[in-house]
Amino acid sequence: MSLTRPATEFAALIAGLRDFIDQEVIPREDLRSAHDGAAVQRLSAELGLRAQALGFGAPRLAVSEGGLGLSWEECCAFLEEAGRSFLGPAILQCAPPGQPDIAALEQLASPWQRQRYLDPLARGQSRSCFAMTEPAPGAGSDPRMLATTARRQGDGWVLDGHKWFISGAMRADFAIVVARSDNGVCWFLVDTSNPGFQVLRDIPSMEPFDVGGHAEILLKDCQLGPEALIGEEGKGLEYAQLRLEGARLFHCMRFIGLSSRAMDMAQDYAAQRQSHGARLAEHQMVQAMVANAHIDLYAARLMTLDVARRLDLGESIRHTSSMAKVFVSEAVNRVADSAVQITGALGISEDVPLSMILRMLRPFRIYDGASEVHRAAIAKRAFKQRLHA
Ligand SMILES: Cc1cc2nc3c(=O)[nH]c(=O)nc-3n(C[C@H](O)[C@H](O)[C@H](O)COP(=O)(O)OP(=O)(O)OC[C@H]3O[C@@H](n4cnc5c(N)ncnc54)[C@H](O)[C@@H]3O)c2cc1C
């Protein structure tokens, strides 16, 4: 067990967070402005200040830096509570892409990069985005198809390429851009104010309460100094794997929270609504949906917790996080889908947040590795282990 504080103190923190989310955050979710990025951003900023004042911000940031300094294991409970609201992770400084960018830069940044980019990002004074995916025929599920180039110019670099679906880019101060040099895949720090970094558009998507959008970006003659290279040239794919492992775990935690909120709402509905002479809660097929959802949530929590404990112990989580990501992403979708089914037309409406929860969860089966790609990698490793057994 990786606990940074006494169990009673941690339980009080989680109980306080639950109250804050239930009483001050969920009531402020305005479903009518769920697709108004500017309104969501304003509200997030206001609630973020309130969260900070209550001492709830930045679960992974060290206590000395003003954060909570939680272990990965402790983050499971924290992120589950935060994730029950669409707005929770952003206002508690643990939403992607910032959180995984911080984790990656903590391991890779030079002293100059730390001071210029990481420290303000970790303190919530600046925002980042991570730019790897490209429209076809560039990199998507297969990162080896990366088409963005990085060529040497003097002692610096010039980047050229086309990126899309870059989360958070609409309000980011800098991007971590993945590009290919003569010596392999590399990571670069690029200020979004660089004239060679052009945001073409915010791509409309099915996700509600999106802060920072998903941008299409053109990198054209984007000139960088030598200090922009992160870590070592040629190690970019290794770094991307490292970044994704922690990132997908955070998604698992917060989406367990969001899907369990959907099931709570469905159960409340089923406890009241009558059909064919009985409450929905008394019909066995409804009971089966509720039971299956709780089995899914229980398994999802255990898998996520196990991977978090391994991360705390410094173990490799490549295989386990991949299995957890596939299971949890599909489980939370099943839970939210059943919640919509149980609530009938009300669940489809936007009078209540259920259909939005389903829309928020659906992309998780695609980003941070589509289920099919993870299954292929899991099977490959399983066969390899068998061959060496
Ligand atoms: C909401 C959202 C946010 C995102 N944020 C970011 C971001 O911040 N930064 C970033 O760089 N990218 C981001 N992405 C992009 C994401 O990483 C890619 O969508 C993902 O890697 C899949 O690539 P693709 O969309 O090009 O799909 P493709 O590679 O075209 O694949 C399409 C489908 O084909 C199937 N498939 C692909 N390969 C295989 C295979 N080997 N075996 C079997 N089936 C396969 C899968 O079902 C897959 O879903 C985001 C995407 C979404 C939806």
Image (cartoon, helix red, strand yellow):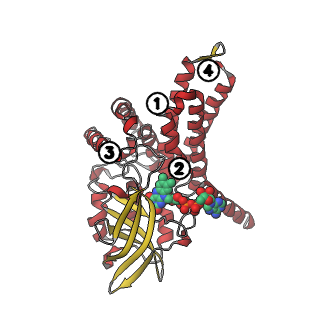
Give the image location of residue 186, x and y in percent: 44, 74
Is the CB of mark 2 within 8 Å of ligand 1? yes
Q: Dot 3: within a 10 Å radius of its alpha carbon, few (fewer than 14), some, or many (20 or more) residues? A: many
Foreground pick, 71 / 297: 297
Circles 4 and 2: CB distance less than 8 Å?
no
Comes first in the chain, label 3 or label 4: 3
Q: Please indicate, yes or no, whether residue 63 appears anywhere in the rendered image.
A: yes
Marking on residue 352: 1
Give the image location of residue 50, x and y in percent: 27, 38
Circles 3 and 4: CB distance less than 8 Å?
no
CA distance separating discs 3 and 4 = 40 Å
CA distance separating discs 3 and 1 = 28 Å
Judge whether 379 appears above or below 229 on screen.
above
Residue 344: which quarter of the image? Answer: top right
Q: Which corner quadrant of the figure contains ligand 1? A: bottom right
Secondary structure at numbered mark 4: helix
Comes first in the chain, label 3 or label 2: 3
Is the CB of mark 3 within 8 Å of ligand 1? no
Marking on residue 363: 2
CA distance separating discs 3 and 2 = 26 Å
The three-letter amino acid code for the residue at tag 1 is Val
Give the image location of residue 37, x and y in percent: 35, 47
Give the image location of residue 220, x and y in percent: 37, 74
Comes first in the chain, label 4 or label 1: 4
